[in-house]
Amino acid sequence: MLYLIGLGLSYTSDITVRGLEAIKKCDRVYLEHYTSILMAASLEELEAFYGKPVSLADREMVESGCEEILRGADKQNVAFLVVGDPFGATTHTDLVLRAKKQKMPVEVIHNASVMNAVGSCGLQLYNFGQTVSMVFFTDSWRPDSWYDKIWENRKIGLHTLVLLDIKVKEQSIENMARGRLIYEPPRYMSIAQCCEQLLEIEESRGTKAYTPDTPAVAISRLGSADQTFKSGTIEELSQYDSGEPLHSLVILGRQCHELEIVYLLEFADDKTKFQSSVTQDQEYFKPAPWVPPTEDAE
Ligand SMILES: C[S@@+](CC[C@H](N)C(=O)[O-])C[C@H]1O[C@@H](n2cnc3c(N)ncnc32)[C@H](O)[C@@H]1O
């Protein structure tokens, strides 16, 4: 059996009872180690908690074949652990499809994900549109396809969850070119960098999917002992020190329920300014008034 097991967001003990019982039955245990990190636990702590060794599975191991992970999963039990939920944000459907193709039984054990825990900032999950990912810009690579998705969400008044890039096992271009297996130190995008990149692309596109004054909320270390939220405009959050990773950002949509605003005001340094940025944003994105068709148009 191949078990895909969600670990939840932060602590070793966030795993479900069913997830832990499955690990106990497993001959090999892999921890997916490139899309997220378990903030309050080290590998050694996980191994001690499960009572067995855990191998780190990097992007290369998971995406180029997954043979090592699937080896023998038709006769043995193998666990593939994913921080959050196995299907939250990054889906591991490719691994499941490969296992099924090889006639291996698969069981998924779910857990909390950033995709649902984000609701603890006070915004209602029903009011979210498409989620987007913000990658680290380089001198020659500044992808902005996420801009159109934010624009689409904002047109129909929905909030946008922005997930921030993390790089846990990357080679420099030089080391890659020379075939040297030397990895760069891990990097996690901050809220400030994400907002700077948002502002840069808005300036170059100029179609006002959002503006520097658009209200947003920064969400840091969700589910850990020191999770924090900060409400502010995108401009204000481009100056915000978000501290240790992990971070996500939500850009507000026009369809904001009064209770959502009341909740967010608690996280604003200047409540009056935040309230006025919400009002102005709602006004700007207000749908055009409905005009009944005239006889001529029929
Ligand atoms: C690619 S997603 C993987 C999501 C994970 N599988 C889950 O279900 O939660 C990873 C990104 O989600 C966001 N994220 C994940 N956990 C978070 C947390 N606890 N607090 C804030 N953001 C988080 C970060 O932007 C991070 O880079």
Image (cartoon, rainbow, N blue to C red):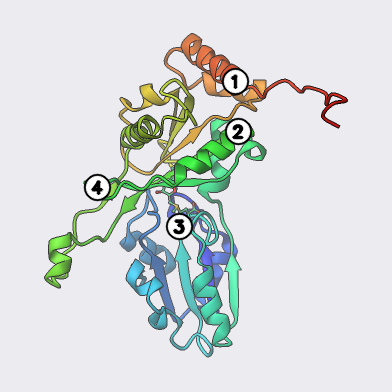
Tell me if the residue at label 3 has its CB under 8 Å from ligand 1.
yes
Q: Residue at x 30, y 29 (%)?
A: 241
Rate crowding at label 2 as few (under 14), some (14 to 19) or many (20 or more) other CA atoms within 10 Å: some
Which mark is on residue 249?
Answer: none
Q: Is residue 296 above or below residue 223?
A: above
Find out whether the residues at labels 2 and 3 contact each other: C-beta distance under 8 Å: no
Q: Secondary structure at mark 2?
A: helix
Q: From the top left corner, tell me how far across and down residue 155 is, in percent.
A: 60, 33
Q: Is residue 67 above or below residue 178?
A: below
The mark lying in front, picked from 3 and 1, is 1
Q: Which residue is mark 3?
A: 83
Cα distance, mark 4 to mark 1? 34 Å
Q: Secondary structure at mark 4?
A: loop
Give the mark nearer the N terminus: 2 vs 4. Answer: 4
Q: Secondary structure at mark 3?
A: loop
Give the mark nearer the N terminus: 3 vs 1. Answer: 3
Q: Amino acid at mark 1?
A: Gln
Cα distance, mark 2 to mark 4? 29 Å
Q: Secondary structure at mark 1?
A: helix
Q: Which residue is mark 1?
A: 282
Q: Residue at x 56, y 56 (%)?
A: 111
Q: Residue at x 52, y 46 (%)?
A: 131
Cα distance, mark 3 to mark 1? 36 Å
- Work out whether residue 239 or residue 28 is closer to the camera in this orientation and state it: 239
Cα distance, mark 3 to mark 4? 27 Å
Find out whether the residues at labels 4 and 1 contact each other: C-beta distance under 8 Å: no
Q: Which residue is mark 2?
A: 155
Give the mark nearer the N terminus: 3 vs 4. Answer: 3
- Residue at the top extreme, as displayed: 272
Q: From the top left corner, tell me how far across and down residue 27 is, in percent.
A: 45, 81
Rate crowding at label 3 as few (under 14), some (14 to 19) or many (20 or more) other CA atoms within 10 Å: many
Give the mark nearer the N terminus: 2 vs 3. Answer: 3
